[in-house]
Amino acid sequence: MRFWMLGRESLWYDEGLSDWFSRLSLHNLWTQVPAYEIHPPLFYTFLKGWVALFGNSEAALRSMSVLFGTAAIPLVYLLGSLASVEGRGRATGVAAAALFALAPIQIAYSQDARPYAMLVFAATLALVGAFWLMANPGKAVEPLFGLKRNGETAGHAPWAWGALTFGMALTLWSHNLGFTLVVALLTTTLPALLWMNRARRSFMLNALFSGGVALALWSPFLPWYLRQAANVHTSFWAKPMSLEGVGSGFNYVFFLFLDPFWIKTLMMAMAGAGLLAINRERGRLAAGALAGVIIIPFALEILLSLASRPIFVPRTLIWTSVPFYVAVGAGLAIKMRWAIKAPLILLLTVGLAQGVWNRFHHQKEPWREMAQMVVEKAGTSDVVVAIPNSVAIPFSYYSSRLFPELKIIPLPAPFPAPGMDRPYPSGNVAEPGFTRADAASFDKMDCQSSSIWLVTRFRWLYDPELIAFEALSEKCDLIESGGYPALHIARFGKKRDQKNTPPATSR
């Protein structure tokens, strides 16, 4: 599923940036990029090595995420088997892993050259370690993580502590909002383990050391993290919080591409039944911890968005669907007649199959098609103006293959462009907005003997007053205009006599 039609769709904007970052030097990635990019550089570092081996085609760029997404499937099985009692753990694990493997949103982000599949893998690894310790509290108190056992061979405890430690560190390195996982663990599994172990000194030392190692592994990025947080606090593209936005985000994380209301209702009902079963069989601490790692990250992003600047971005929370699938799997593992269970499994399978169909008929931002449209009509002296400046990156990814001579001018300055006397509306200090002062850039452009192509993304954010469009309309005639929901392209040419000017085409 994750490799199927991997290169069919063109790269979307963010994937184009991933390719661009992967071609920078390691020194640049770790000393300059964090000053303006709002994601940690680890994913781009991994991708750089991956591209060196397999190239930077669409399929090659995405295939590393495929492996992260696929590697998470057995981890989901382990998490499911640990969440339920021993007798039904395997059934819960199989059901959870199957749901995860077929979940359209997980397939979609496993086919995306962005760090979200790595984030899901890392968070699931940490959850497996935490829930193993909850399922085996006696092992969690063994000194030195169970490595020293009076000459006996170490059991699974060191692996669990290692999964928790490195899973937390990798989550923090995967995304700047990965701290929501750490907070969820600190407020759910840690109190539960303290209660189970009566706050034994050996457990507390293990927990402190584990958290300390995770923090130490991530600490080199801390200064950059604080700087990026300050940039985001100044300006960020996320919309203000609303009930509609929260509901839409919840639907995105758990039910993306699952359109029928009945499949959503069924999965919610099975998740509720699963949590009740875990509460009955494993106790309130286990059920509460599983519910907590689903709910707390949402609540944290919402509260921070209300208290400061909006940062609620649903895709940063897709890892919370993993414990949700475990809860649904626990509901399916409840003892019931097959005359009831079989139809439930069939309904879930049909709903997921329809969601997978929807996912593979969903179009990403079509930069390949946009570049082809320009190249088919552009002359050798034509110019493409890109706003914001980073738009030049995904556009040139395709135009350089089709028409290498085509001149692309990013405005107001080439990416990255920090420190300009301009607003930075997205929170990325490399992408300045377009102002009236920047319209002077068009004075040296010729539209009498060639065309000027204006390619924009999120005009409402970077050029809300349509300054560039109006300035070119005064200088030249609009020949054609059109695009897609987030993208717009306009072609300007020679100024003609108003009486004989044909109407501009639009699509």
Image: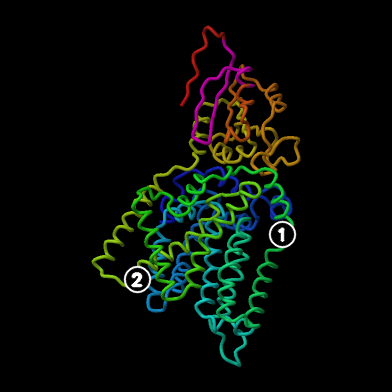
**Residue 146 sits in quarter:** bottom right
**Residue 31 sits in quarter:** bottom right
Exactly how many numbered labels are in the figure?
Answer: 2
In the image, residue 181 lies at what x, y percent?
A: 58, 62
Instruction: Say left or right for 266 vs 188.
Output: left
- Mark number displayed over residue 85: none
In the image, residue 380 lies at what x, y percent?
A: 59, 26
Q: Classify mark 2: residues with Cα within 10 Å, few (<14), some (14-19) or many (20+).
A: some
Q: Secondary structure at mark 2?
A: loop
Mark in the foreground, 1 or 2: 2
Residue for point 67% across, 35% down: 433
Q: Is residue 492 magenta?
A: yes
Residue farthest to the left, as pictured:
339
Frontmost residue, 459 versus 441: 459
Q: Label 1 is placed on what type of residue?
A: Leu
Residue 507 to residue 390: above or below: above
Residue under label 2, please give it. 334
Q: Label 2 is placed on what type of residue?
A: Ile
Q: Is residue 493 magenta?
A: yes
User: How has the structure been colored for display?
Assistant: rainbow
**Which quarter of the rendering shows the N terminus?**
bottom left
Residue for point 61% across, 93% down: 150
| Residue interval drawn in magenta | 471-496
Residue 27 to residue 461: above or below: below
- Distance from disc 1 to disc 2, alpha carbons, whole Å, reads 45 Å
Frontmost residue, 203 versus 59: 203
In the image, residue 10 lies at what x, y percent?
A: 49, 43
Q: Classify mark 1: residues with Cα within 10 Å, few (<14), some (14-19) or many (20+).
A: few
- Mark number displayed over residue 222: 1
Sequence-wise first label, 1 or 2? 1
Residue farthest to the top, as pictured:
499
